[in-house]
């Protein structure tokens, strides 16, 4: 290999490893995860120890908004755009794919 290729490969590996190395911490500084069950952590044992829930609102107002239905113009534009994307992907795949000649 040429020296420039070796330098480029070393630089690419260094760039990939730098973010990971910057986040490394010693084992004693990592946060501790408590793996005990809820009972062992001190969860409330009786219903009286649970905090009281917030009260529900007294009045609820339901508002119905009339819907104009489906906007078929927007649906047609979306379907046409999807068709264009599929056709472009198919044409790209056919262009890139190597054809096998009959022997």
Image (spheres, helix red, strand yellow):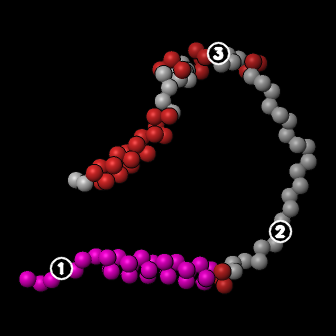
Q: Position of residue 53 (x, y in %)?
A: 80, 31
SS at mark 1 in the image: loop
Q: Residue furthest right?
A: 59
Q: Compared with residue 25, is residue 1 higher up or lower down, i.e. above or below?
A: below
Q: Earlier in the sequence, mark 2 or mark 1?
A: 2
Q: Position of residue 47 (x, y in %)?
A: 73, 21
Q: Which residue is at a point 69% across and 18% down the rendered structure image? A: 44
Q: Which mark is residue 42?
A: 3
Q: Earlier in the sequence, mark 3 or mark 1?
A: 3
Residue 101 counted in the magenta span:
yes
Tell me, yes or no, whether the two marked residues, 3 and 1, touch with CB atoms within 8 Å: no
Image quadrant occupied by the C terminus: bottom left
Q: Which residue is at a point 83% across and 68% down the rendered structure image? A: 65
Q: Which residue is at a point 24% across and 77% down the rendered structure image? A: 98
Foreground residue among 33 and 65: 33
Q: Residue furthest left?
A: 103
Residue assigned mark 1:
100
Q: Compared with residue 41, is residue 16 higher up or lower down, i.e. above or below?
A: below
Q: Position of residue 21 (x, y in %)?
A: 46, 34
* C-alpha separation, residue under disc 3 versus residue under disc 2: 48 Å
In magenta, the rendered stretch is: 75-103
* C-alpha separation, residue under disc 2 versus residue under disc 1: 60 Å
Foreground residue among 12 and 87: 12
Tell whether 92 sits left or right of 57: left
SS at mark 2 in the image: loop
Instruction: Tell me which corner region of the image, top left, top right, bottom left or bottom right, holds residue 100.
Output: bottom left
Q: Which residue is at a point 69% across and 80% down the rendered structure image? A: 71
Q: Which mark is residue 65?
A: 2
Tell me, yes or no, whether the two marked residues, 2 and 1, touch with CB atoms within 8 Å: no
Q: Earlier in the sequence, mark 3 or mark 2?
A: 3
């Amino acid at each position: 290999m040429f020296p420039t290729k070796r330098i480029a490969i070393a630089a690419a590996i260094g760039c990939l490893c730098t973010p990971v190395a910057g986040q490394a911490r010693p084992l004693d500084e990592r946060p501790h995860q408590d793996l005990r069950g809820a009972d062992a952590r001190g969860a409330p044992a009786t219903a009286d120890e649970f905090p009281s829930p917030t009260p529900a609102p007294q009045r609820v107002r339901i508002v119905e908004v009339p819907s104009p239905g489906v906007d078929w113009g927007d649906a047609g534009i979306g379907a046409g755009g999807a068709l264009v994307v599929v056709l472009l992907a198919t044409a790209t795949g056919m262009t890139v794919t190597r054809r096998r000649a009959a022997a």
